[in-house]
Amino acid sequence: MNNDSSGVIVTSLREWIATSAPGARLPSTRALVAEHHVGPATVQQALRTLVALGLVETRPGVGTFVRAPRASRTHDFGWQTTSLGAPRRHIPTASASLRPVRHDLISLHSGYPAAELLPERLVRAAFARVARADAAMSRPPAEGMPELRSWFASELADLTPAAISAPGPQDVIVVPGNQGGLTACFHALVGAGRPLVIESPTYWGAIHAAAQAGVELVPIPTGPEGPDPDVLAGALARSGARAFYAQPTYANPTGARWSVEVADRMLQTVREAGAFLIEDDWARDFTITGEASPLAARDDSGHVVHLRSLTKSVAPSVRVAAVTARGPARERILTEVRAANMYVSSALQAVALDVVTQPGWRTHLRAMRRQLGERRDLLVDAVREHLPMGEVTLPAGGLNLWVRLPDDTDLPRLVTGCEAKGVLVAGGDDWFPAEPVGKHLRLNYSGPNPGAFDEGTRLIGATLAEVT
């Protein structure tokens, strides 16, 4: 059998296939034998090579035909998330989004806004004033400075309808960032070995906090408008869970925002189940279009436990957040906060309060939201141009785009290949509490150098073509 002759036939037929329509019938073996002056075995070897390359398909007794290109498709296997649950001993690794921003690379991976989007002047002035004040040397109450607790409570109260009893400062606990609040809530409201219903995908830090607390996760799929309330009801009933962690406003990573109708059904579901809804309201400051109203503003029955962080909107160095809870739940959470942290630095609390009570804070938020919208649109346009095989939804707020890639994408190779080309991206697997459903990238449009978005997505597209 002549391998050189077989290679010549393969090359000739590949050229013919390139100009032929899918389904076109290749010349018969007899015709190829005559054309290339070889034996039938050599022709069959060439055809087997073309079959292995996926270029042709054989139909016994009929002939060999040009194969239609296999379409890159995505599939929705989200229903399996609820059926299978989270694997036991699922201990996540640190998220790629925590890697430092590198100025020698195009950084689309981070979960934080660029420095130019933060109120730097307000923060520096606040630190200077606090350094001269008593807060620089004092120890605050375990539940937080009264003035800051009043601010958090009044912010929620301003959004609370008149028919509902608004929370007060006595309901607020200041915690060291959202992560500290999540850990305290999971310990106090769920406990080791007990179930917690959680969206999938969801914030990777919540998965970490649940693992630290020894909580058993019960994942339910979520989409652009949040989870299905009926699926939540079923998960609560089957698992016996009495808590549900969710991000109703610009969820990380999907950007989903629950509609009023979905939010009302979710509230009704947790009330009927006698459960808590742990509402992670991390992104309200990053609203781009529309209005964002937390579920906690529509609940005075104690079912919603509300987390509100200032870390990303004020400064990464100001790790200050608040948990608002009513009744015995608040006391249990406070006990966990005392045990884990004793108290939050009074200097950081004073800086946070100084910044958010300055007249320039509202002005800054308006400017930041406008810039976020411009950056979001810039990155969306670039993704749609250079990643046409991806699926992306336009979020109304938050910091990121959630891009669905073809199912045959080799995600680890894509991430490392992008870095080799000069762009940092975050693979979507970190945000799934169970096995990932589909291949995704989370791309940050609030990061540095938006002028590089087009080049960055072009490099991602080039790398994707190499690994699929």
Image (tube, rainbow, N blue to C red):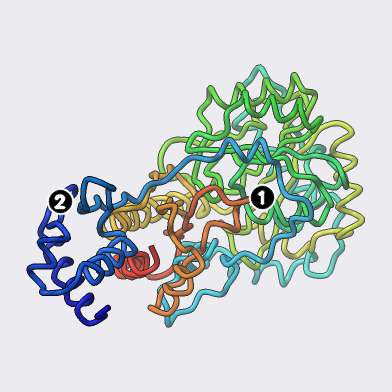
Q: Earlier in the sequence, mark 2 or mark 1?
A: 2
Q: In the image, what residue occupies the spot 43% across and 36% down?
A: 290
SS label for mark 1? loop
Q: Amino acid under label 1? A: Pro
Judge left or right: residue 9 versus residue 340: left
- Residue at position x 47%, y 38% from top? 224
Q: Is residue 256 left or right of residue 51?
A: right
* 2 vs 1, front mark: 2
Between residues 123 and 269, which one lies in front from this camera angle?
Answer: 269
Closer to the camera, 1 or 120?
1
Give left or right: position of 74 versus 360.
left
Any part of residue 450 in sight: no
Which image quadrant is residue 5 in?
A: bottom left
| Residue at the front extreme, as displayed | 39
Where does the image place residue 233, in percent across and percent down from the top left? 69, 24
What residue sits right under mark 2 in the picture? 25
Q: Position of residue 388 (x, y in %)?
A: 29, 53
Q: Give coordinates of residue 381: x percent, y percent.
A: 28, 54
User: In the rendered image, which quarter contains the C terminus?
Assistant: bottom left
Return the x and y of residue 434 as percentages of the image width and height: 66, 49
Identify the residue at horizontal 65%, vertical 69% (top origin): 127
- Quarter containing the N terminus: bottom left
Which residue is labeled 1 in the image?
A: 433
- Number of labelled discs? 2
* Camera-nearest residue between 121 and 305: 305
Q: Are marks 2 and 1 in contact (CB under 8 Å)?
A: no
Q: Residues within 10 Å of mark 2 (few under 14, many from 20)?
A: some
* Mark 1 crowd level (few <14, some 14–19, many ≥20, 10 Å Cα): many
- The amino acid on which the numbered mark 2 sits, given as a three-letter code, is Arg
